[in-house]
Amino acid sequence: MASATNFTIDELISVCISRQVRAGDVWAQGINTPLVSAGLILGKLRYAPDARFTSAIGQALLQDWGALGISDIEKLWVGKGLVHLGFATGAAEILPSFQPKEFFRPAQVDARGNSNNIAFGADYHMPRLRLPGSGGIPDVTPCYDHSYLYVPRHSRLTFVETCDFISGLGHVPWRRRGGGPRYLISDLGQFDWRDGEMRLISLHPGVELRRIQRKTGFKLAVAPDLHETPPPDAEDLRLLREAIDPLGTRKLETLAGSARKKLLRDILRQEGANYEANAAQAQC
């Protein structure tokens, strides 16, 4: 199918995520990651119909899917679960047995793939900024090598020489198990870890190498076959826009400030209108 030209960066990121989905995969789905949710569902539809998900929301294992939203997103993961597990059971049994793959969004990441979601600043008790927290990242990343990363806004604030704290373990020589993250997608390009060092493997359309180097806080390795990221095709965009995420929740991760606030209000308004329309129809 021919490539499309009228796509947005959120769509490109979700499409790149979808291309990581393989037949037989089990993917762990975190909280408040619509770019990843959209990408994983797209990957299931296009490449791996037998792919399954485990979800932190509802702590369920599922193979079905539904359109993304905000106010009732629990319905997707809870209402369609094949089985529901407690967190301890999921961590002790699902993770070791199924070895699910998962995309994490780091607040900081270094060249080795170590990541930080704890705080900015060297003093834990008086940080410059307290971050959302690490969740299960410290439990997962030391034990297996199926972690993937995504950064919606590529900057030197995120790509750093040294992380202030390490909550996600990267490619360090002393680790006994696992191997650090395999892949990273940002709004500027795609990366892997060849020989344990972060490496640029593709530039998104219209992005120059010097721009990525300027926005990265460490020396970045570059693949010898560096190429342009293949754009979405028409079917990718149709599925994202019409079936998977018609409200555009994936855009919330690429926007900031007033633009993000406006989109959030618009989505909640549309969901409220849809709820009232469905309720009225049910009473007829």
Image (tube, rainbow, N blue to C red):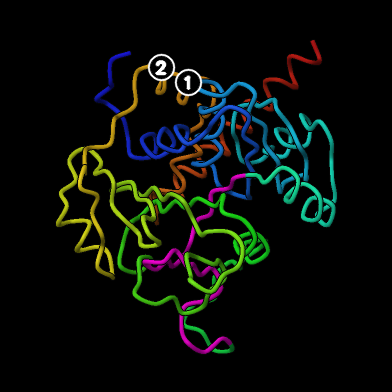
Image position, residue 75 (x, y; %)? 74, 34
Q: Which quarter of the image is occupied by the C terminus? A: top right
Q: Where is residue 53 in the image (x, y as percent from the top left)?
A: 67, 36
| Residue at the spot 62% in from the left edge and 34% down from the top edge | 25
Which residue appears at 55% of the width and 21% of the height?
A: 45
- Determine the residue positioned at 58% across, 27% down: 23
Q: In which quarter of the image is residue 206?
A: top left
- 195 sits left or right of 275 in the view: left
Say whether marks 1 and 2 touch (CB < 8 Å): yes
Q: Nearer the viewer, residue 73 or 153?
A: 153
Q: What element carries label 2?
A: helix
Q: Residue furthest top?
A: 284
What separation in Å lies between label 1 and label 2 (alpha carbons)? Answer: 6 Å
* Three-letter residue code for mark 1: Leu
Could you tell me which residue is drawn at 48 percent across and 70 percent down? 172
Q: Magenta residues?
A: 101-124
Q: Which amino acid does label 2 sit on?
A: Glu
Q: In this view, does 280 lie above or below 206?
A: above
Label 1: how many Cα within 10 Å (few below 14, some 14–19, many 20+): some
- Disc 1 on helix, strand or loop? helix
Read off the residue under disc 2: 235
Q: Mark 1 points at which residue?
A: 239
The spot of residue 204 in percent (x, y) is 25, 41
